[in-house]
Amino acid sequence: MKGLKTTGLTKDFGGLRAVNNVDFTLEPGQITGIIGPNGAGKTTFIHLISGVYLPTRGTVELDGRDITALPAHQRSQMGLGRTFQIIHPLENLNLVENVMVGCIYAGGLKKKEARRKAEALCGDLGLDRLNRPVDELTVLEIKKMEIAQALAAEPSILFLDEVMAGLTGEESFALIDFVKKIGSDRNLGIGVVEHVMGVIKELTSSVLVLDAGSVIAAGPYEEVAKERCVIDAYLGGGA
Ligand SMILES: Nc1ncnc2c1ncn2[C@@H]1O[C@H](COP(=O)(O)OP(=O)(O)OP(=O)(O)O)[C@@H](O)[C@H]1O
Ligand SMILES: [Mg+2]
């Protein structure tokens, strides 16, 4: 199978099961939302896929190859890209240099090609004035910079961990358009962790709902949003 597949993915932290037996697939061209309350295991799930953590049990496959035991940098070179919930720009580098770092370390490019590539990626995300220091960038621009960095290694699968957090409604919708365009231009499979249901509805074709580490629902947004267990666990009863 092309794309990403997890089977029985499980992670224990001592006595706490943060991710419990998750079966999941993400195919090229598909955008899937990953939702659930705080502490549901969403970030841990992405850490397991990207190789930050090794699972207690279960497997991760990319394009049919078992990558469960591979280190993070190899997964990234093989086409697994991601952003981090906690952003970490390099403060002493400017905008384009931050993206260049991704092009050099994850993309394996030399400095000159890395600059060209970083400029092109910034252009794809609508970023301009590329020599600005990061402390002059808006939150939206920082988020776009992080996505550009994640695209540096030409991923086929991309996970975005709450990239809309901290944005106004208008900014979120601007970023949604970029994410959609990037996904369709590159035929990416994109996994989007997001708390705002309006964003999930607008951006994704299917949804995975986690609660206390387990999948409580999965499928098209319209169907999943109607399920009682999802409303109780996530939408707060009245939604
Ligand atoms: N390194 C760790 N050591 C111990 N427990 C952890 C660790 N990382 C996460 N946890 C716990 O695992 C559970 C899942 O956390 P995780 O960060 O994956 O949730 P999340 O769904 O991303 O939450 P949020 O919406 O707040 O980002 C939580 O109970 C958390 O406290
Ligand atoms: Mg998280």
Image: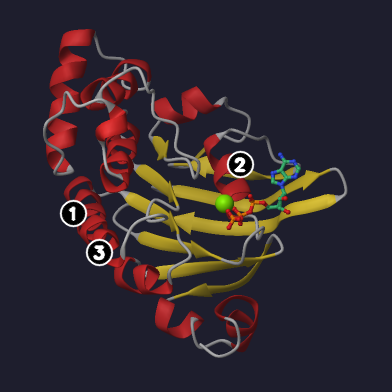
For the point 41% across and 69% down, the residue is 206
Query: What colouring style does the render use?
Result: secondary structure
Name the N-terminal-most of marks 2 and 1. 2
The residue under the point 45% across, 61% down is 194
Q: In percent of the image, x 59 and y 82: which residue is there?
A: 236
In front: mark 2 or mark 3? 3
Vertical relation: 90 (above or below) 217: above
Distance between the Cα atoms at labels 2 and 1? Answer: 27 Å
| Cα separation between marks 3 and 1 | 12 Å
Q: Is residue 151 above or below residue 165?
A: above
Q: Earlier in the sequence, mark 3 or mark 1?
A: 3
Q: Which residue is mark 1?
A: 181
Q: 121 and 239: which one is in front?
A: 239
Kind of residue sitting beneath label 1: Lys
Q: Which residue is mark 3?
A: 173
Q: Is mark 3 within 8 Å of ligand 1?
A: no
Residue 70, image x and y in percent?
58, 27
